[in-house]
Amino acid sequence: MKRKNILLIGGSHGIGFEIALKLYSEHNIYIASRTSENLGNLEVTHIPYDASKDEIDPSALPERIDGFVYCPGSINLKPFKMLDPKAFEEDMQINFMFLVKIIHTILPNLKNSEQASLIFFSTVAVKVGMPFHTSIAAAKGAIEGFAKALAAEYAPQFRVNVIAPSLTETPLAKRLLGNEKKKELMNNRHPMKRVGQAEDIANIARFLLSDDSSWITGQVIGVDGGMSTLNVN
Ligand SMILES: NC(=O)c1ccc[n+]([C@@H]2O[C@H](COP(=O)([O-])OP(=O)(O)OC[C@H]3O[C@@H](n4cnc5c(N)ncnc54)[C@H](OP(=O)(O)O)[C@@H]3O)[C@@H](O)[C@H]2O)c1
């Protein structure tokens, strides 16, 4: 199997970290994030990078990027009347605009790959309307539209797919799963009777980054314990 160069924007925690754990022995992993302490001695290349402030240093990147995953995101759940336009703007920035910016920067590196695979994250709350999700659903909806158009424009050279998780136990979701009672409530909301684990999402990301998925592009894949498609309650 050919060793790929895979760039994870945000692989220091959560889902991105789990992807790094699954892939580092088979591929060259580059993690661009604000912190690196959690990486310990993991054999990856860390690039200090804050998507909200910095341009990524192109000289720190490999010339050829075969896989790309953008992990920064937000969970800002409030009634619409409490979400002012600034809150929408902030969600749009971290989830979508900084993603667009980094892809512009790394286009030449992606083009050096035989077939680059790009993965973005959406949320179950784009397919299913949920109260208090107006801002995040709008930002992630932008990602879904962008991903499909980008996939069309760059086919067959790039594959672009989106993973749409439901609630997954990571640092980002800490506030929603802060105690056993909250967790039980959230577990029970899902047809599969549990919230997601980072590994549930990393498994599909590994597949999408591999050549086993070379005929899959422009898809939004729900990894959500049945939340987007089943009504069992
Ligand atoms: N967890 C869920 O319940 C859930 C549900 C639906 C969708 N999602 C989506 O799935 C994706 C991954 O979520 P997660 O739960 O793994 O998130 P997470 O636990 O917050 O991890 C995010 C990663 O991105 C990095 N990051 C955050 N802001 C950054 C910035 N400004 N510049 C560079 N790196 C930054 C963080 O590293 P540093 O802090 O070191 O920078 C971290 O490695 C997100 O897009 C999220 O919206 C998650």
Image (spheres, grey):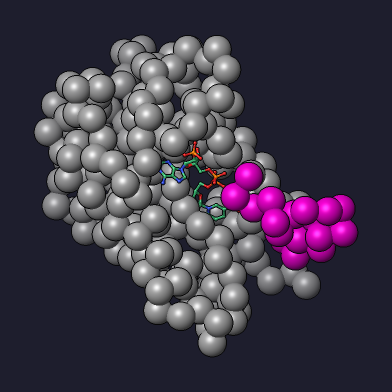
Front-lying residue, 233 or 20:
20
**Residue 114, relative to residue 106: is it above or below?**
above
Residue occupying the point 55% across, 12% down: 41
- Asked if residue 119 can be seen in this view, the reply is no
Q: Position of residue 37 (x, y in %)?
A: 56, 25
Quadrant assignment for the C terminus: bottom right
Q: Position of residue 204 (x, y in %)?
A: 50, 39
Left or right: 44 in relation to 103? right
Residue 109 picture quarter: top left
Which residues make up the magenta segment?
Answer: 171-192
Q: Which residue occupies the extreme front position in the image?
A: 53
Q: Which residue occupies the extreme right position in the image?
A: 181
- Asked if residue 94 can be seen in this view, the reply is yes
What type of secondary structure mainly makes up the magenta span? helix
Residue occupying the point 27% across, 27% down: 66
Residue occupying the point 45% across, 57% down: 122
